[in-house]
Image (spheres, rainbow, N blue to C red):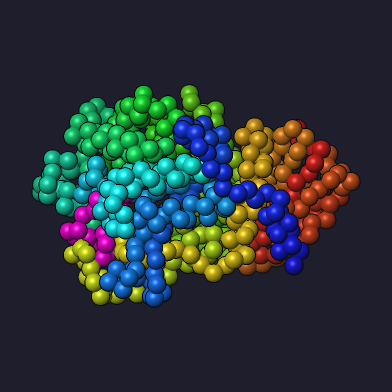
Amino acid sequence: MFKRFLIGVLALYFSVGASLADDVWVNDLRSLFLANNAIIYEINLRTFGAQDVNKDGIIEPEEGEESGNFLNAISRLDELKSYGINTIHVMPIMALGKTKALGTAGSLYAPISFNELNPQLKSERTALSLEEQARKFISEAHKRKIRVIIDLPACASYDLYLRRPELFVKDSSGQPVVPSDWTDVRLLNAGSENKINPDVYNLYKGFVDYVMDLGADGIRADVAPTKPARFWNELINYSRKKDPQFMWLAEASDSWTEAVADQAVFTPYDKLLEAGFDGFYGSYFKMKDWRSAAELINHVKFTNSLKTKFEQPKSVIGSFATHDELSPVLINGGAYSSMIIWLNSTLPVNSYFVDGFPSGDNYIYLWANKKARKTYTDDDYYFVHRGKLDIFNYSRQPGGKDLGLKNEFAVANNFRKFIAPILANGKFTVLKPNNSEVFAYALSYNKTTILVFGNMNFRAFNEATIKVPHFDDSMLTIPIQMESIPVAEKDKFKLKMIPGEIQVLLVDEFELK
């Protein structure tokens, strides 16, 4: 009851309505990202605004239903604004291949073109062209002060290979290479550090021109290690001459050590950052496997060190739950989702969430991997990855039924905006509990301190004593998020936390040195 009351009060205090700007949009995404102030929401346009009238999970136009598209996505932008979202990561929007496909609509990451929009995203309820619809969607996002990142696929469809085989890596038998287990795509040949392939470079350069012309503010590079650092350096520098604030996010991890195929290039995360990327994913998605608090804290220390390690500052996203990961509710229930929300809110990272996450979608589709009633590719089955956002079919709008989590999501994001100066300028201090399963850290700036305590054990209660030097229990301490009540004493807190609990407290007129 206390938690619900607190969240309700904070929602009234921190929430902000949509602010519509009439002036000309000026991109500031790179600065926002490097200050750790981006709150990013990943969407699949094909499902984001989908209208599933009969609620069977599949979009059937012949039944009067409409798949997600650029125009019906606009109706959800105010919803994102109310959540505190200031940036959207739009999954690939280019035309898709249909041969050797996965799913009845084709994977978003199997493009047949890098300079032609996906006709699946066109609304037929308007006279606007597809490009005009795309520009309108981005413009409407900008009116709400929401920046737009467009996804750049790492590979291409078999259909594009048939059109332009010179773009692809070949094996010893002359066949195009299938990377990893991604059977619906073939590996592009970007060249090497000594000589980049001009054909693939120009393909990507055309993509950059295209999405910048649409009004995009940045690019997320899918599986960025599959291209040489020199390739990225030239492409990023090219975009920055057009817009110095154009942001580049690499899908890469410090825990990735192998190429996606024997014939593939592998460029590690640090070389990608040196090449000009503003940030990368890090390894926060591995938290599901971490059992000790030290594993989380050590990774925070590592990613935080990137601010000064390179010639230009770098940052990272809170990649705890991406579209490549199982839904958090399938891993450790709603408590895990709550912990991810508040870690994103209080760590020196850019917050990152997937459509459907705020309301606890488990991404379980009853028709998954069954024979399809109708298909638009050469795949007769509704192919999906169990427990992950569907990117292969015309399917329902993502979303669960956890309204409490949704409210918590909005509160945490708007609290994050409230403490933005602390996140951008404050000191991150690791605190030391006497329990290896409990993490604790503080953020301090300008006589304000945020204290965060968490129980990494999602199966059992945990007790801990946490030393907070120079803390006095007479100080004004505001509970922001908690289930149980910590006991404050001089220089310390005593906790008895429920499984998977995270606590957030704000201490006024107190700064850890």
Q: Position of residue 247 (x, y in %)?
A: 43, 34
Magenta stretch? 93-110
Tell me, yes or no, whether the highlighted magenta stretch contains residue 105.
Answer: yes
Residue sticking out furthest to the right: 474
Instruction: Using the image as rendered, state which of residue 82 and residue 159 is in the foreground.
Output: 82
Q: Would residue 262 be found to the left or right of residue 42 on screen?
A: left
Q: Is residue 420 visible?
A: yes
| Residue found 21% across the figure and 49% down from its top | 112
Q: Would residue 69 be found to the left or right of residue 508 on screen?
A: left
Q: Is residue 255 visible?
A: no
Q: Position of residue 436 (x, y in %)?
A: 67, 54
Residue 39 figure quarter: top right
| Residue found 36% across the figure and 26% down from its top | 242
> Height in image: 31 above or below 375?
above
Residue 370 figure quarter: bottom left
> Height in image: 261 above or below 208?
below
Q: Position of residue 19 (x, y in %)?
A: 57, 44
Residue sticking out furthest to the front: 127
Instruction: Using the image as rendered, state which of residue 444 and residue 143 is in the foreground.
Output: 143
Residue sticking out furthest to the left: 173
Q: Main secondary structure of the magenta part?
A: loop
| Residue found 68% across the figure and 45% down from its top | 441
| Quadrant the N terminus occupies | bottom right
Q: Would residue 5 be found to the left or right of residue 94 on screen?
A: right
Tell me, yes or no, whether the highlighted magenta stretch contains residue 279.
Answer: no
Q: Position of residue 194 (x, y in %)?
A: 24, 27
| Quadrant the C terminus occupies | top right
| Residue found 31% across the figure and 54% down from its top | 126
| Image label count | 0
